[in-house]
Image (tube, grey):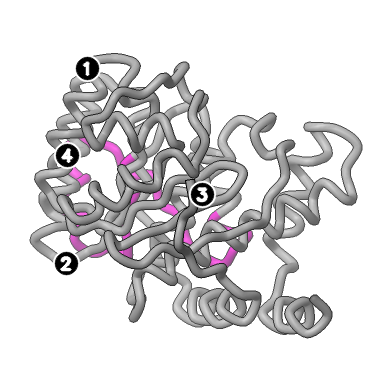
Amino acid sequence: MTITHTPVTYQQLAGELQRLRDNTPLVHVMTNEVVQEFTANVLLAIGAAPAMIVAEEEAGEFAAIASALLINVGTLYPARLAAMKIAAAAAQKAGTPWVLDPVAVGVLSYRSDAARELLAFKPAAIRGNASEILALAGLAAGGRGVDSTASSQSAVKAAKQLARDTGAIVAVTGETDYITDGERVLATLWGHVRMTRVVGTGCALSAVVAAFLADAPDRLLAVAAACGILGVCGERAFDCSEGTGSFKMSFLDALTVIAPAQLRTAEDNA
């Protein structure tokens, strides 16, 4: 299947990274309990400020003052879902952009129903693998927990429809990441398979998507830049690591030292 898309450039990554670091967005993170520390460290490394606020009594108040919100349904249970709905409603009312990460939607009915309920609060972006995006769009998908059994390319049509139905930017990530607003499709070609061998890289990406959405003049480009920059850092981390343990540390280092000037130079040398 041929997909009409526009590749994201290093120059675009550089501009979006500079914007993020100038703003230092405060990201309200409601993510799964397996990846909280790693997600916080990724946000700090890229230049954002994380806050893990999960209590029902605080979630709405904080979502209204944060720069952006992430809702990840990875470790979902009733109290967490209640807090997520409060936060999403507050974000919608306050105009805070928020991201839905529909982890393993399509595999289990409770989280699938919950994710669809959360769509009513109008996320600014949805980030998932192909199986998750296919399932959220109402199509049959063959996911296996957090792993996708479908290619990102196979889910682009569903991603475009989901974007049109929800008004969200939809990112379907995989070997190639495709990001769409329902009409335009951007693609990022960076990344390394070792990123899939470290728990939390996908979840952290969704948090970084939220960070880039804060005060973004072009939300499609902002989401694509988040995907692209983490992919670039994944490649660089692989080049200076020996296995998954050192890769994780090298990945955080790469996020810390990556700079707009480096990205512009990479464009010139490409």
Q: Residues within 10 Å of mark 3 (few under 14, many from 20)?
A: many
Q: Earlier in the sequence, mark 2 or mark 3?
A: 2
Residue 45 lies within the magenta run: yes
Q: Earlier in the sequence, mark 4 or mark 2?
A: 2
Distance Cα–Cα, label 1 vs label 2: 28 Å
| Residue topped by disc 2 | 95
Q: Is residue 157 magenta?
A: no
* Crowding near the residue tagged with mark 4, few <14, some 14–19, many ≥20 C-alpha atoms within 10 Å: some
Q: Secondary structure at mark 3?
A: helix
State how far apart marks 4 and 3 are (Cα). Answer: 19 Å
Which one is in front in this view, the residue at disc 4 or the one at disc 2?
4
Residue placed under numbered mark 3 in the picture: 205
Say whether marks 4 and 3 touch (CB < 8 Å): no
Q: CA distance from mark 4 to mark 2?
A: 16 Å
Instruction: Give the distance between the C-alpha atoms of the residues marked 3 and 1, in whole angstroms.
Output: 24 Å
Query: Label 2 amino acid?
Result: Gly
State the image coordinates of residue 14 (x, y, percent, origin top left): 61, 79
For the point 56% across and 78% down, the residue is 12
- First reached walking from the N terminus: tag 4 or tag 1: 1
Q: Nearer the viewer, residue 35 or 129?
A: 129
Q: Which residue: 19% across, 20% down?
A: 78
- Comparing 100 with 182, the one in front is 182
The residue singled out by tag 1 in the image is 110
Please indicate whether residue 72 sits to the left or right of residue 209 in the image. left
Residue segment shown in magenta:
43-71
Q: Can you give x and y, in whole percent of width and height, for residue 191 in the image? A: 68, 50
- In this figure, which residue is indicated by the disc labeled 4? 118
Q: Is residue 197 left or right of residue 78?
A: right
Q: Name the amino acid, label 3.
A: Leu
Q: Quadrant of residue 141?
A: top left
